[in-house]
Amino acid sequence: MHTILDQIKKLKALADTGLLYASNDYDRERYTELHEISLDLMSKVSGNSTEALNEMFAPVTDYPTVKTDVRALVLSADKKQVLLARESADGKWSLPGGWADVGQSPREVAIKEVKEETGLDVMPKALLAVFDKRMHPHPPQPFYVYKMVILCEATSVELTNGFDMLDAQYFDANNLPELSTDRILKRQIDLVYQKAITTDFEAYFD
């Protein structure tokens, strides 16, 4: 299923690129048809309606590229616990983070997301990993996504969950709650946690 969805994403990207650079009506008509076919196929595979998919994707005005998700790994003072935020969308837990914002560096995104979701002030220390979601067993998603995980050190202590989050807590690294698997997987947390506690700051990447 994931392989099929990956191929559909490529088809859509090719159609979008073709529409962007098409120089005549003949090409525009055919790339439009390819675009519609890709959304129809994506709808069948992902379970989203074509109308919902159309709303998800902004009009393409430049070469289509990967979306970037920035997550922060924050450890307790004794380095035995991991900070997680509970998502309101599904009631499950994730490393604090979200989509990278235009005009903000990955460092700035990590600081902002941790503050908004958990109330903590943090100082980014190292890029631990860049995951290609296609290479990991996340649920199917219409977007093609790279996920960055940045090690951050907490510089405050009071936890307060953000307006769109249900909770924020530290959990034992070996006893994590149910995770929001669209956002993060246990084996990904295990990987970056081990890198953090062993001070292995050479970034993992797919």
Image (cartoon, rainbow, N blue to C red):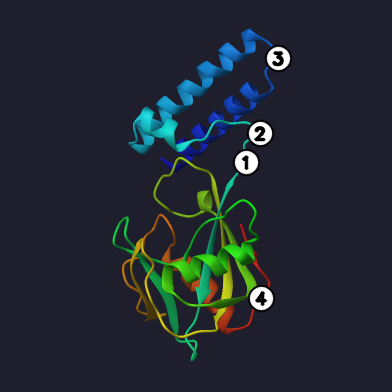
Amino acid at pointer 3: Ser
Q: Pointer 4 and pointer 1: residues touching (CB < 8 Å)?
A: no
Pointer 2: residues within 10 angstroms few (<14), some, or many (20+)? Answer: few
Amino acid at pointer 1: Thr
Q: Nearer the viewer, residue 187 or 76?
A: 76
The residue indicated by pointer 4 is 201
CA distance for labels 3 and 2:
15 Å
User: SS of the residue at dot 2?
Assistant: loop
CA distance for labels 1 and 3:
21 Å
Q: In the picture shown, does residue 84 fall above or below 77?
A: above
Nearer to us: label 1 or label 2: 2
The residue indicated by pointer 1 is 65
Question: Residue at position x 62%, y 41% from top?
Answer: 65
Nearer to us: label 2 or label 4: 2
Q: Residue 159: give x, y in percent of width and height.
A: 40, 79
Disc number for residue 23:
3
- Direction top: furthest residue: 26
Q: Earlier in the sequence, mark 2 or mark 4?
A: 2
Task: Quadrant for residue 12, please give it.
Answer: top right
Pointer 1: residues within 10 angstroms few (<14), some, or many (20+)? Answer: few
Question: Residue at position x 62%, y 22% from top?
Answer: 19
The residue indicated by pointer 2 is 62
